[in-house]
Amino acid sequence: MKVSVIVPAYNEERAIGKTLEILSRYLLRSFPDSEIVVVSDGSRDQTFTIAKKYQSDSIRVFEYQPNRGKGYALKYGFSKTTGDLVVFYDTGVDFPPSQIGKFLQLLEKTDSDLVIGSKRHPHSKVNYPLKRKIISFLAQACTHLLFNLNVTDTQVGLKVFRRKVLEEVMPLMLVKRYAFDIELLVLAHRRGFKITEAPVDLTLSFSTAGTLAAVWKTFLDTLGIFYRLKIMGFYDKSAEERERLIREYRTTPWDRAISFISRILKLNSSNENT
């Protein structure tokens, strides 16, 4: 079966070249009938220009402006893929490309619909600070409490899907940034797809300001998902009804509150950068 690897990138001029070199070398050797779809998500540096140098029959590079978020980039990238199996792979080679092969083997061995990496898997080899471990634990507890989603980690940037999962779930999704992975997994779980977690080899750093801001915004997005799922029943409605609700989305008290808080966060962030 053909494998499509989506590589989202935002201002990754230092890493995109190395990523494509290592990734394409592995895929050519292990999965000759594969493709790489690179999406420059409104990058303001040379990410797109550098990536274009690697464009070939098996590597296609796309760009749009302005930046719209990793989730949007993955949805856009998926629309350009043709593979039976689809891989999300973060720029930066945080994961050895060989892990893609292990995930695909696990997908078939367990007859799963998607395999996701987990830092908290007992066999994972990870090096990341205590603060991130605490955040990861709290995030898992939150998603389990709100959605009964029994996975230990939603945010690792290596995931493998059977195409049918994304074809069914992607049209329902609204989140474009911080809680994209959560919305995707919640909907896959709700639709009855089998999710399997896999160990990863990973080293992470920790940026206090950036990460805590992202955690807060992820939390707000997660509450929005809960509201749409449990209160609005948004994801179970017809396409026409969803479109109507989207047009009215900002008129509900809950979403006005979320929008207000988000504007405050954005204002504070702007003030810190001036």
Image: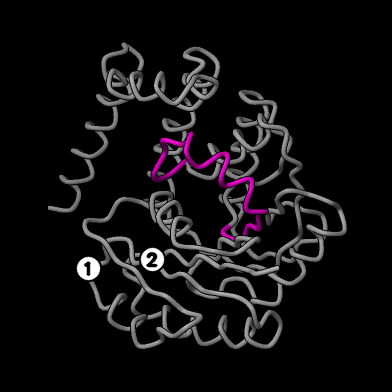
- Residue 223 position, x and y percent, is 47, 25
**Tag 1: residue type?**
Arg
Element type where label 1 sits in the image = loop
Q: Residue at x 71, y 82 (%)?
A: 30
- Residue at the extreme right: 109
Looking at the picture, does residue 100 appear above or below residue 225? below
Magenta segment: 157-179
**Tag 2: residue type?**
Val
Looking at the picture, does residue 206 appear above or below residue 223? below
Looking at the picture, does residue 203 appear above or below residue 110? below
Front residue of 69/236: it is: 236
Residue 271 is left or right of residue 93, and the answer is left
Q: Residue at x 68, y 79 (%)?
A: 31
Q: Residue at x 35, y 25 (%)?
A: 243
Q: Which residue is mark 1?
A: 44
164 inside magenta stretch: yes
Q: Which residue is mark 2?
A: 39
Q: Splitting the image into 4 quarters, where does residue 97 fall?
A: bottom right
Residue 6 is left or right of residue 165, and the answer is left
> Is the image coloured rainbow, by chain, by secondary structure, or in one colour?
one colour
Residue 231 is left or right of residue 252, and the answer is right
Q: Splitting the image into 4 quarters, where does residue 249 fall?
A: top left
Q: Please report whichever mark, 2 or 1, sits nearer to the chain's N-terminal start.
A: 2
Identify the image quadrant of the N terminus: bottom right
- Residue 198 position, x and y percent, is 76, 57
- Residue 130 position, x and y percent, is 61, 53
Please tell me the numbered disc located at residue 167.
none
177 inside magenta stretch: yes
Q: CA distance from mark 2 to mark 1?
A: 13 Å
